[in-house]
Image (cartoon, coloured by chain):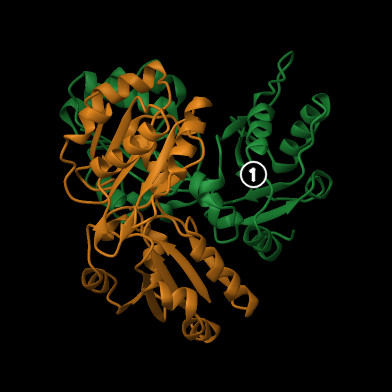
Chain colours: A orange, B green
């Protein structure tokens, strides 16, 4: 059996009771280490907390060489841990299908995801979010602008946009970096982004949330990762008030 | 202090370790009983599990008479429990602002929400969801069709729609009821909804997921509540395959 278990947002205690019980009764524990990261813990701390060895999995292990642990899952009780809620990343969905194709029973144990946590942190209403998007670090000769397209479309529909910020190895995009990138894109397209809401360390005891114009947000130190960004559409009164009270608008 | 704690999707063990520790050290424990419901447990079972009395809160308690427990929160450590992830409902956001206005410190402990869980259950990709909507039970002289507007707009943008189904006291809208309502609206608007994905008991050990046309889904018994519905846009290959494997498409 292969059970996908979400670890939630920040540290070892963000897992559900249900998930923790599954881990402690599993034969083998794997931790997916490439789509996101729990910044408030380490693999060593997780191993100690679960009283089980935790084996890291990198992209190649899952996407190129999954047979090793799928074979294990045919006879044993394997858990596959990941930050957030499982399956928000397509690589997990692909793995679940591969398992099913081999006749392996699968299950999912859910956990908090940044995609709903942003509502509580920002006060921006869940039903007003449109399509989300990712903002990658630009590379040499590659400066993708699809995030701006999504943002502008949502703004035109009066919908908020959740912008996932890139993680590459030990490099975590910050809110000010993201604002810089989006402002460059917007200038190239003669577009304007009126307001940003930056969020750092969601799920921790001290999340940091700030709302403001590009100029205001670019000069804020959001502190350690992970960061995420929301581009709000025109605010409802209650959303504005919430951002004034909890995000320094 | 007032701490909003999400209970996750289904039963008493869907809470995070962090949330459970907070509850067990709180002075007073309230459970919000009107926006959603944990179907896999009862208030008595939660009280026993937490080893604390759990006091139910109804809409009037929170929206009309919050002063009683806000006054308590000025001097004591109060926790406010709710199904799913807190603050997805606007009534929670309003309460947090009222607390802040009285100088009460607030915090949020996140948990799994149906809004991300649907991705794992259906294989429909998170970044392809547009605006979500709610489908209320029609009343005498009131047959709201705004859900259809949202669905049709999302379909035209090639985006999926999460449709929250109404809960009224002990009446829980089922997937087949929702499909009936939407088909009536669609017929009135000469519109067509090509595919439905119904989900029941998300977060339980036996979630039930079925994809198909209106005719196929209307005849399916989804079993006990809660139910939720997704209207997928044109499927990507991997989404289609996932629904074939895990949702009987």
Where is residue A20 shown, x and y percent of the image?
36, 65
Residue A152's x, y, as percent? Answer: 47, 32
In the rendered structure, the residue with mark 1 lies on which chain?
A: B
Residue B40 as seen in the image, left or right of residue B235: left
Q: Which of B83 and B146 is in front in this view?
A: B146
Outermost top residue: B141
| Residue A56 in sight here | yes
- Where A34 falls versus A16 (above or below)? below
Q: Mark 1 points at which residue?
A: B230
Judge by depth and name the residue closer to the eye, B33 or B239.
Answer: B239
Dot 1, how many residues are within 10 Å of its Cα: few (below 14), some (14-19), or many (20+)? many
Residue drawn at x 78%, y 51% as measured from the top left: B220
Identify the residue at horizontal 83%, vertical 29% (top origin): B187
Q: Is residue B63 left or right of residue A177?
A: right
B78 up-or-down from A93: above or below: above
Judging depth in this view, the residue of B125 and B215 nearest the camera is B125
A18 on left or right of A42: right
Q: In which quarter of the image is residue A41?
A: bottom left
Q: Indicate the position of residue A246 as horizontal and vertical percent values.
A: 25, 28
Identity of the residue furthest to the front in this view: A141
In-front residue for pair B208/A33: A33
> Looking at the image, is A47 positioned above or below residue A217?
below
Q: Is mark 1 on a helix, strand or loop?
A: strand
- B74 over A94 or under it: above or below: above
Quadrant in which the C terminus of chain B is drawn: bottom right
Percent position of residue A112, x then y: 39, 50
Q: Can residue B34 be seen in this view?
A: no
């Amino acid at each position: 059996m292969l059970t996908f278990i979400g670890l939630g947002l920040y540290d070892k205690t963000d897992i559900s009771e249900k998930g923790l019980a599954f881990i402690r009764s599993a034969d083998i524990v794997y931790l997916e280490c490439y789509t996101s990261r729990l910044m408030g813990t380490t693999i060593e701390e997780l191993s100690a907390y679960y009283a089980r060895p935790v084996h890291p999995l990198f992209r190649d292990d899952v996407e190129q060489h999954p047979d090793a642990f799928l074979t294990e899952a045919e006879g044993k009780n394997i858990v596959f841990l990941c930050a957030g809620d499982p399956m928000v990343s397509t690589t997990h969905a692909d793995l679940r299908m591969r398992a099913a194709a081999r006749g392996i029973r699968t299950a999912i144990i859910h956990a908090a995801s940044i995609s709903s946590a942003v509502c509580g942190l920002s006060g921006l209403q869940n039903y007003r979010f449109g399509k989300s998007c990712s903002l990658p670090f630009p590379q040499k000769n590659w400066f993708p602008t699809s995030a701006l397209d999504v943002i502008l479309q949502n703004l035109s529909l009066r919908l908020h946009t959740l912008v996932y910020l890139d993680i590459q190895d030990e490099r975590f995009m910050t809110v000010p970096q993201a604002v810089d990138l989006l402002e460059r894109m917007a200038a190239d397209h003669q577009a304007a982004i009126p307001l940003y809401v930056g969020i750092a360390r969601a799920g921790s005891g001290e999340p940091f949330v700030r709302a403001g114009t590009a100029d205001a947000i670019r000069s804020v130190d959001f502190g350690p990762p992970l960061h995420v960004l929301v581009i709000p559409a025109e605010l409802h009164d209650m959303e504005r008030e919430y951002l004034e009270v909890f995000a320094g608008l």
